[in-house]
Image: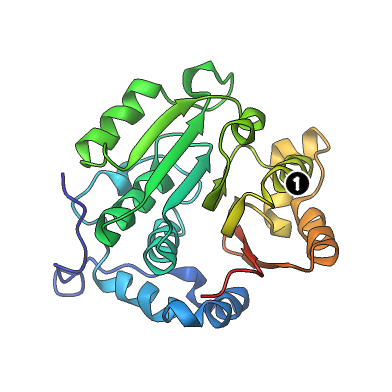
Amino acid sequence: MYCVFAIWSGKAEGLSIKIPYLADKQLMDLNERLQGRGVLTDLLKSQEGDPFDKGTIIPELDSSYKKNHYQYLFYVLTRMLLPKRIVEIGVLQGFSLLAMGCALKENGTGEIHAFDLFEKYEYKCDNFDDVASRVSEMELEKLVTLHQADASSVATFIEETDILHVDVSNDGQIVSEIFSQWENKTSQAMIFEGGSLERDKVQWMVEYDKKSLFDEFLELSKNEPEWHFFTIHPFPSITIAVNGKYEP
């Protein structure tokens, strides 16, 4: 199955999508920050009529990102930033992984190292072999390497990355720990699932009294002046921390 980019007319077939976060104020701010790499909002709008994942398995996969079409944000950011290396911590079925992999394929360069406990995780998970099969089906084996490892151990054997994506039942404490591990290893941007007040109110966050993601990103924005934080709000929300040293 090939990654498809702008070769079909969704509107003509009555299959166009609507990306809800295009009107998000923080997306506009992110667009301004990255304007040296292109117009983020225009590239996202192009996905509404010509989504890259038409005809692929990506829309069928389980992900909290799925309802609000965040695969297009992952895809467009990867196309814009042209990273040579992406590290993803937390894979599940591969929704964001495959989106970024398709973008790297279009870029003609780059690699992804993706880490998860897979079937060893006691809560929501998928099997290593099933995810590897999807990577193969999308013909991304040369770009994507899967690793079975705990989130906290990844930084010990990855020296540097351009983009880091983290989706591991995120809470404020997890974000604090991972940010401190990776702030000197990440050259372009860190992408975290969550960051909105709505995301803080999910049942398990409240039930187990987890530290607020919203509060943690507020603290980081005050204490880490070299990083610029943007939270895109449609659920589950995504917070993108752009390294101030990165010049688009």
Instruction: Give the percent coordinates (x, y) of residue 229.
Output: 68, 66
Write down the residue under mark 1.
180
Q: Nearer the viewer, residue 81 or 160?
A: 160
Instruction: Give the percent coordinates (x, y) of residue 151.
Output: 62, 32
State left or right for residue 122 relative to residue 44: right
Q: Where 70 sits versus 202, above or below? A: below
Q: Where 178 sits versus 243, above or below? A: above
Quadrant (top left/top right/bottom left/bottom right) for the N terminus:
top left
Instruction: Give the percent coordinates (x, y) of residue 128.
Output: 39, 23
Q: Which scheme is used to colour this image of the protein?
A: rainbow
Residue located 80% across and 62% down the image: 224
Q: Where 62 sits versus 7, above or below? A: above
Residue located 75% across and 46% down the image: 180
State left or right for residue 219 relative to residue 47: right
SS label for mark 1? helix
How packed is label 1: few (under 14 Cα within 10 Å), some, or many (20 or more)?
Answer: few
Q: Where 179 sits versus 189, above or below? A: above
Mark 1: which amino acid?
Ser
Is residue 66 visible to the viewer in this orientation of the structure? Answer: no
Instruction: Give the percent coordinates (x, y) of residue 221.
Output: 78, 65
State left or right for residue 97 relative to residue 109: right
Q: Nearer the viewer, residue 207 or 176?
A: 176
Residue located 25% across and 60% down the image: 106
User: Which quadrant of the structure image shows residue 72?
Assistant: bottom left
Q: Nearer the viewer, residue 198 or 216?
A: 216
Numbered circles on residues, count: 1
Is residue 113 visible to the viewer in this orientation of the structure? Answer: yes
Residue located 53% across and 36% down the image: 90
State left or right for residue 63 relative to residue 211: left
